[in-house]
Image: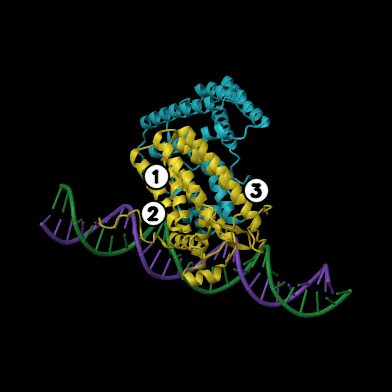
Chain colours: A yellow, B cyan, C green, D purple
Amino acid sequence: MDTLTDGAAEHAHTTSWIASVLRGRIAAGELTPGSKLSEEPLSAALGVSRNTLRQAFTTLAGESIVTRIPNRGVFVASPGVEEVREIYRVRRMIEPAAVLWGDLTPEVLHNLEEIVQRAQEARNSGSVTDMADANQSLHRAVVALTGSASLQELMDRVLAEMRLVFYTMASAPDFHSHYVDRNVALVKQLRAGEREEAAAGLRAYLDTAEAELLEHLADSALPAGAPGSGAYGTR
Amino acid sequence: MDTLTDGAAEHAHTTSWIASVLRGRIAAGELTPGSKLSEEPLSAALGVSRNTLRQAFTTLAGESIVTRIPNRGVFVASPGVEEVREIYRVRRMIEPAAVLWGDLTPEVLHNLEEIVQRAQEARNSGSVTDMADANQSLHRAVVALTGSASLQELMDRVLAEMRLVFYTMASAPDFHSHYVDRNVALVKQLRAGEREEAAAGLRAYLDTAEAELLEHLADSALPAGAPGSGAYGTR
DNA sequence: GATTGGCGGATTGTTCAACAATTTTCGGCG
DNA sequence: CGCCGAAAATTGTTGAACAATCCGCCAATC
């Protein structure tokens, strides 16, 4: 009994392996939003059959990491204003809900405090990416309060899409630095057990963050011949 | 965000067509939880290639309507106690959140009132299935208050899984009849604008519903040689 | 007699080559 | 300049093949 299907698993089997490879490349920014993923070249480059690549595509399409247009091909998702609004619609529900009704254990609180501390250090050292990472970690940890794998998964998808949004913006201004203090305050409120105040503050934070993001998105509007962007009129 | 429950729709393209067919058969109870979906017979029966059936499988697996076990096959998902807990973890977050922070327009309120009225009529006429349908419609409509397609999609998945839970239970006692009044009260509170009370009541309702369901599930525990049941975590 | 080991059959995972359907490109023509 | 139409390219689907893995069965061993 050595070989039991251990969770982590190496390459589960080629299809999911390929899916995770593509997921990684997109997350790393190697594959930029809007770029087309042609089947024949990609399958050759990855050394897999066009057929299994296709299967990986359906997986990624299900995660809305990639958009598939019939008879046209698949493209790296390039979120527009509508997608950003949807992202914040989701966050404005599940994050405050987690704050209000989540399971606040001492170790989770400690974890949250550690994250905001990391964010503060990142701000001091001026590392924008570290600050962004810490910020995402924090909000991810907040949703973890729900204890729900499904909600966690949804939040992960949302955060991944968020990263895509940042990639689409030509200029990436410092969104995060002036949110660090808000996060500190949030965690402090949680520590104090002031859940309703924390939830209200979080909703306010999400509102302003959305507004700022939308504004910058409108500015750096690269019309882009790339499909999948912006408003689709379905079909 | 286009796919999933995209109405009747003509066969957009075979793969998604097959996926929706299977989705429908599972929802209709023709394919019971735990039953195996063998590739060769099924592809023959559906008149499609084994390869495209396989692609449809990955779609359904992504929606966790079906569980795929490597080298063993795919099975209709058969939710157990852990899955039920997860379902209610989700519902206990997003439904009260929708009640608290959703967009309460007059027409939506009217819609909700119509649904509870339908439930009452169903109770009077003693139709259990109609009552169950009305109940699901109500909670679906509650989540619709969020205005978020992603949350709606998640809720739809949860409700679909819920139906599978009912299928697994040998005896289906009348869960819904004594929840009708609660739903009436909920809508009344929403009409009165008492959101916090509504949210609190909803959470209490979900708690008791989960407890009852878990109890009945423990009773009618068909151990079932069928795989796919029981706890897996993570995706 | 029960457990272990291996053997064959069946099913899944993946690849390859082809063809139909559709989009895209490109060139000619009004 | 723009429209039309045919060729080329790409996607969607099929069918057959093969490797890998799992399952049940039978025999060998202790």
- The chain holding disc 2 is B
Give the amino acid at mark 1: Leu
Give the amino acid at mark 3: Ala
Residue where numbered disc 3 is placed: B9
In the image shown, does A112 or B215 lie closer to the viewer?
A112
For residue A218, say whether it is visible.
yes
The residue lying furthest to the top in this view is: B124
In the image shown, does A121 or B73 lie closer to the viewer?
A121
Helix, strand, or loop for circle 3? loop
- Marks 2, 3 in one chain: yes
Query: What residue is rendered at 49% in x and 34% in y?
Result: A197
Which of the two labelled residues, at mark 2 and mark 3, occupies the earlier sequence position? 3
- The chain holding disc 3 is B
Position of residue A110 in the picture relative to residue C29 (left or right): left
Residue A72, horizontal then vertical, whole percent: 63, 63
In the image shown, does A194 or D21 lie closer to the viewer?
A194
Helix, strand, or loop for circle 2? loop
**For the residue carrying disc 3, how many other residues have a C-alpha within 10 Å: few (<14), some (14-19), or many (20+)?**
few
Residue where numbered disc 2 is placed: B72
Residue A180, horizontal then vertical, whole percent: 47, 48
Q: Of the residues tagged 1 and 2, which is closer to the observer?
A: 1
CA gap between label 2 and label 3 equals 32 Å
Query: What residue is rendered at 43% in x and 50% in y?
Result: A137
Give the amino acid at mark 2: Arg
As drawn, the label of residue A112 is 1
Residue B116, horizontal then vertical, whole percent: 60, 25
